[in-house]
Amino acid sequence: MSIFCHQNRGNFHQFYTFFQTFFTKLSIMDKSGCIITYPVEGYRENALKCVIRLGVNKVILLNKNEHYVNLFNEIKLTSEVIPIPIDNVSSVVNSVAILISDAKKNHDEVSVLLLPSDLIIAIGMYIAACMEKIKALTPVSDFEIAGLTLPLFPFVNLNKNEKFVLARIIENERVSTKNLFAKIKKEYCDMLYPESKNFNLTNKEKSAFRQFHRMLNKLEKMELISKEKRSKNLILNSTSYGKLTFGQRDRNRY
Protein backbone atom coordinates (compact mmCIF):
# COMPACT_ATOMS: atom_id res chain seq x y z
CA MET A 1 0.00 0.00 0.00
CA SER A 2 1.40 3.39 -0.94
CA ILE A 3 2.04 5.79 1.91
CA PHE A 4 1.50 8.72 -0.41
CA CYS A 5 -1.96 10.13 -0.99
CA HIS A 6 -3.20 11.87 -4.11
CA GLN A 7 -2.43 15.57 -4.14
CA ASN A 8 -5.03 18.14 -5.19
CA ARG A 9 -2.53 20.94 -5.65
CA GLY A 10 -3.86 24.48 -5.89
CA ASN A 11 -2.14 27.56 -7.22
CA PHE A 12 1.38 27.46 -5.85
CA HIS A 13 2.13 31.15 -6.38
CA GLN A 14 -0.98 32.16 -4.46
CA PHE A 15 0.04 29.92 -1.58
CA TYR A 16 3.61 31.26 -1.62
CA THR A 17 2.47 34.90 -1.53
CA PHE A 18 0.12 34.19 1.35
CA PHE A 19 2.82 32.68 3.55
CA GLN A 20 5.88 34.69 2.49
CA THR A 21 5.46 37.28 5.24
CA PHE A 22 4.95 34.58 7.86
CA PHE A 23 8.14 32.78 6.85
CA THR A 24 10.14 36.00 6.99
CA LYS A 25 9.04 36.45 10.60
CA LEU A 26 9.67 32.79 11.34
CA SER A 27 13.23 32.98 10.08
CA ILE A 28 14.26 35.45 12.77
CA MET A 29 12.79 33.34 15.57
CA ASP A 30 15.03 31.15 17.65
CA LYS A 31 13.98 27.85 16.15
CA SER A 32 16.22 24.83 16.14
CA GLY A 33 14.66 22.28 13.86
CA CYS A 34 15.84 20.54 10.72
CA ILE A 35 13.95 18.63 8.07
CA ILE A 36 15.48 16.33 5.45
CA THR A 37 13.75 15.62 2.16
CA TYR A 38 14.33 14.49 -1.40
CA PRO A 39 12.91 17.26 -3.64
CA VAL A 40 10.26 16.22 -6.15
CA GLU A 41 8.83 18.54 -8.79
CA GLY A 42 5.21 19.44 -8.15
CA TYR A 43 5.49 19.09 -4.37
CA ARG A 44 7.17 22.33 -3.35
CA GLU A 45 3.91 23.48 -1.80
CA ASN A 46 3.78 20.41 0.40
CA ALA A 47 7.38 20.89 1.47
CA LEU A 48 6.68 24.53 2.29
CA LYS A 49 3.65 23.64 4.41
CA CYS A 50 5.61 21.01 6.29
CA VAL A 51 8.36 23.50 7.06
CA ILE A 52 5.89 26.04 8.42
CA ARG A 53 4.05 23.41 10.44
CA LEU A 54 7.27 22.28 12.14
CA GLY A 55 8.86 25.71 12.44
CA VAL A 56 12.26 24.45 11.29
CA ASN A 57 15.19 26.72 10.54
CA LYS A 58 17.04 24.44 8.13
CA VAL A 59 16.15 22.17 5.22
CA ILE A 60 18.52 19.53 3.87
CA LEU A 61 17.82 18.57 0.26
CA LEU A 62 19.09 15.18 -0.85
CA ASN A 63 19.29 16.22 -4.49
CA LYS A 64 19.89 19.55 -6.20
CA ASN A 65 16.70 21.25 -7.34
CA GLU A 66 16.93 24.93 -8.20
CA HIS A 67 13.21 25.54 -7.63
CA TYR A 68 13.41 24.30 -4.05
CA VAL A 69 16.69 26.12 -3.35
CA ASN A 70 15.38 29.42 -4.72
CA LEU A 71 12.14 29.06 -2.77
CA PHE A 72 13.88 28.61 0.57
CA ASN A 73 16.41 31.34 -0.20
CA GLU A 74 13.62 33.82 -0.93
CA ILE A 75 11.99 33.20 2.43
CA LYS A 76 15.40 33.43 4.13
CA LEU A 77 15.37 29.83 5.28
CA THR A 78 18.71 28.03 5.44
CA SER A 79 18.94 25.17 2.98
CA GLU A 80 21.76 22.81 2.13
CA VAL A 81 22.06 20.44 -0.81
CA ILE A 82 23.72 17.13 0.05
CA PRO A 83 23.27 14.64 -2.82
CA ILE A 84 23.12 10.97 -1.82
CA PRO A 85 23.63 7.75 -3.80
CA ILE A 86 20.27 6.27 -4.79
CA ASP A 87 21.33 3.09 -6.60
CA ASN A 88 19.96 0.82 -3.85
CA VAL A 89 18.05 0.97 -0.58
CA SER A 90 21.09 0.18 1.56
CA SER A 91 23.01 3.14 0.14
CA VAL A 92 20.09 5.48 0.85
CA VAL A 93 19.67 4.11 4.38
CA ASN A 94 23.33 4.56 5.29
CA SER A 95 23.65 8.02 3.73
CA VAL A 96 20.46 9.41 5.27
CA ALA A 97 21.20 7.87 8.68
CA ILE A 98 24.57 9.65 8.73
CA LEU A 99 22.93 12.97 7.80
CA ILE A 100 20.30 12.53 10.52
CA SER A 101 22.94 11.69 13.12
CA ASP A 102 24.97 14.79 12.17
CA ALA A 103 21.88 17.01 12.14
CA LYS A 104 20.95 15.89 15.65
CA LYS A 105 24.15 17.47 16.94
CA ASN A 106 23.05 20.94 15.85
CA HIS A 107 19.26 20.82 16.08
CA ASP A 108 16.75 20.11 18.82
CA GLU A 109 14.49 18.18 16.48
CA VAL A 110 15.17 16.45 13.18
CA SER A 111 12.60 14.85 10.88
CA VAL A 112 12.30 13.54 7.33
CA LEU A 113 9.66 14.47 4.78
CA LEU A 114 8.77 11.65 2.39
CA LEU A 115 7.56 13.11 -0.88
CA PRO A 116 6.28 10.85 -3.69
CA SER A 117 9.61 9.87 -5.22
CA ASP A 118 11.33 6.70 -6.34
CA LEU A 119 10.40 3.77 -4.10
CA ILE A 120 14.07 3.06 -3.31
CA ILE A 121 14.49 6.60 -1.97
CA ALA A 122 11.28 6.57 0.05
CA ILE A 123 11.96 3.19 1.66
CA GLY A 124 15.57 4.08 2.41
CA MET A 125 14.65 7.40 4.03
CA TYR A 126 11.92 5.74 6.08
CA ILE A 127 14.20 3.00 7.39
CA ALA A 128 16.87 5.58 8.26
CA ALA A 129 14.27 7.60 10.19
CA CYS A 130 13.30 4.48 12.12
CA MET A 131 16.93 3.65 12.87
CA GLU A 132 17.54 7.12 14.24
CA LYS A 133 14.15 7.21 16.00
CA ILE A 134 12.88 10.44 14.41
CA LYS A 135 9.57 11.48 12.83
CA ALA A 136 8.79 10.62 9.23
CA LEU A 137 6.19 12.85 7.60
CA THR A 138 4.25 12.47 4.37
CA PRO A 139 1.66 14.69 2.63
CA VAL A 140 -1.98 13.71 3.06
CA SER A 141 -3.64 16.65 1.35
CA ASP A 142 -3.08 20.29 0.47
CA PHE A 143 -4.21 21.22 3.96
CA GLU A 144 -2.56 18.59 6.11
CA ILE A 145 0.86 17.15 6.76
CA ALA A 146 0.46 13.94 8.73
CA GLY A 147 3.12 12.31 10.84
CA LEU A 148 3.56 8.59 10.33
CA THR A 149 3.68 6.47 13.45
CA LEU A 150 6.96 4.64 13.08
CA PRO A 151 6.96 0.91 13.76
CA LEU A 152 9.63 -0.25 16.17
CA PHE A 153 11.82 -2.12 13.73
CA PRO A 154 13.86 -4.99 15.21
CA PHE A 155 17.25 -3.28 14.99
CA VAL A 156 15.99 -0.53 17.26
CA ASN A 157 15.72 -3.12 20.03
CA LEU A 158 19.31 -4.34 19.80
CA ASN A 159 21.59 -3.39 22.66
CA LYS A 160 25.27 -2.57 22.24
CA ASN A 161 26.47 -6.13 22.81
CA GLU A 162 23.99 -7.62 20.35
CA LYS A 163 25.02 -5.07 17.72
CA PHE A 164 28.66 -6.00 18.32
CA VAL A 165 27.89 -9.68 17.71
CA LEU A 166 25.86 -8.92 14.59
CA ALA A 167 28.67 -6.74 13.22
CA ARG A 168 31.16 -9.59 13.68
CA ILE A 169 28.87 -12.07 11.93
CA ILE A 170 28.45 -9.71 8.96
CA GLU A 171 32.21 -9.25 8.74
CA ASN A 172 32.92 -12.98 9.07
CA GLU A 173 30.43 -14.74 6.80
CA ARG A 174 29.98 -18.47 7.41
CA VAL A 175 31.73 -18.32 10.75
CA SER A 176 31.23 -21.12 13.27
CA THR A 177 29.84 -20.35 16.71
CA LYS A 178 33.07 -21.67 18.24
CA ASN A 179 35.31 -19.37 16.16
CA LEU A 180 33.03 -16.39 16.65
CA PHE A 181 32.98 -16.94 20.40
CA ALA A 182 36.79 -17.01 20.42
CA LYS A 183 36.98 -13.80 18.38
CA ILE A 184 34.59 -11.98 20.70
CA LYS A 185 36.42 -13.18 23.81
CA LYS A 186 39.64 -11.76 22.38
CA GLU A 187 38.16 -8.43 21.24
CA TYR A 188 35.54 -7.70 23.86
CA CYS A 189 35.77 -10.11 26.76
CA ASP A 190 34.02 -7.76 29.21
CA MET A 191 30.83 -8.23 27.23
CA LEU A 192 30.64 -11.92 28.04
CA TYR A 193 32.12 -12.31 31.48
CA PRO A 194 30.37 -11.11 34.64
CA GLU A 195 32.33 -8.97 37.06
CA SER A 196 31.32 -11.06 40.05
CA LYS A 197 34.26 -12.64 41.87
CA ASN A 198 32.07 -15.58 42.93
CA PHE A 199 32.49 -17.18 39.51
CA ASN A 200 35.39 -19.56 39.02
CA LEU A 201 36.96 -19.89 35.57
CA THR A 202 34.82 -22.87 34.52
CA ASN A 203 31.58 -21.25 35.60
CA LYS A 204 32.56 -18.01 33.89
CA GLU A 205 33.14 -19.84 30.63
CA LYS A 206 29.78 -21.63 30.81
CA SER A 207 27.95 -18.43 31.73
CA ALA A 208 29.62 -16.51 28.91
CA PHE A 209 28.74 -19.19 26.35
CA ARG A 210 25.10 -19.25 27.48
CA GLN A 211 24.91 -15.47 27.19
CA PHE A 212 26.50 -15.66 23.75
CA HIS A 213 23.89 -18.19 22.59
CA ARG A 214 21.05 -16.06 23.96
CA MET A 215 22.25 -13.21 21.77
CA LEU A 216 22.48 -15.49 18.74
CA ASN A 217 18.97 -16.81 19.35
CA LYS A 218 17.60 -13.27 19.55
CA LEU A 219 19.33 -12.25 16.31
CA GLU A 220 18.00 -15.37 14.59
CA LYS A 221 14.47 -14.77 15.87
CA MET A 222 14.62 -11.25 14.43
CA GLU A 223 15.75 -12.79 11.11
CA LEU A 224 18.98 -10.80 11.20
CA ILE A 225 21.12 -13.95 11.05
CA SER A 226 20.65 -17.57 10.01
CA LYS A 227 22.13 -20.78 11.42
CA GLU A 228 23.28 -23.77 9.44
CA LYS A 229 24.29 -27.15 10.86
CA ARG A 230 27.52 -28.54 9.37
CA SER A 231 28.76 -31.75 10.98
CA LYS A 232 29.49 -30.82 14.56
CA ASN A 233 29.65 -27.11 13.80
CA LEU A 234 26.92 -24.49 13.76
CA ILE A 235 27.62 -22.00 10.96
CA LEU A 236 26.36 -18.42 11.23
CA ASN A 237 25.44 -16.08 8.37
CA SER A 238 23.91 -12.64 8.28
CA THR A 239 20.68 -12.30 6.31
CA SER A 240 20.03 -9.67 3.65
CA TYR A 241 17.76 -7.96 6.17
CA GLY A 242 20.54 -7.98 8.74
CA LYS A 243 22.97 -6.34 6.33
CA LEU A 244 20.39 -3.80 5.23
CA THR A 245 19.40 -2.70 8.71
CA PHE A 246 22.94 -2.69 10.06
CA GLY A 247 24.96 -0.90 7.40
CA GLN A 248 28.66 -0.12 7.10
CA ARG A 249 28.27 3.04 9.18
CA ASP A 250 27.00 1.02 12.15
CA ARG A 251 29.55 -1.78 11.71
CA ASN A 252 32.36 0.77 11.90
CA ARG A 253 31.18 1.71 15.38
CA TYR A 254 31.83 -1.74 16.68
Image (cartoon, rainbow, N blue to C red):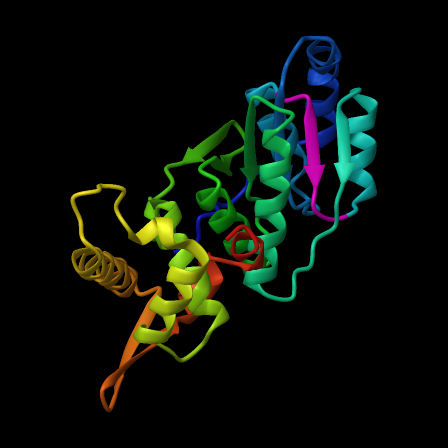
Which quadrant of the figure contains the N terminus? bottom left
Q: Nearer the viewer, residue 129 or 245?
A: 245
Residue at the image position 38 percent from the left and 41 percent from the top: 150
| Vertical side of 51 occupied by 212: above or below | below
> Position of 232 compared to 181: left or right?
left
Decide whether residue 54 is among the magenta residues. Answer: no
Is residue 60 shown to the viewer in this render?
yes
Q: Nearer the viewer, residue 12 or 118?
A: 118
- Residues shaded magenta: 56-63
Q: Position of residue 168 (x, y in %)?
A: 45, 64
Residue at the image position 27 percent from the left and 60 percent from the top: 212
Q: Position of residue 149 (x, y in %)?
A: 37, 37
Decide whether residue 61 is among the magenta residues. Answer: yes
Q: How many marks can you see? A: 0
Q: Position of residue 118 (x, y in %)?
A: 59, 58
> Position of 169 compared to 80: left or right?
left
Residue at the image position 46 percent from the left and 61 percent from the top: 167
Q: Nearer the viewer, residue 221 or 165?
A: 165
> Position of 74 compared to 84: left or right?
right
Residue at the image position 42 percent from the left and 67 percent from the top: 183
Is residue 9 shown to the viewer in this render?
no
Q: Position of residue 226 (x, y in %)?
A: 31, 73
Dividing the picture into quadrants, the one containing residue 65 is: top right
| Vertical side of 11 occupied by 1: above or below | below
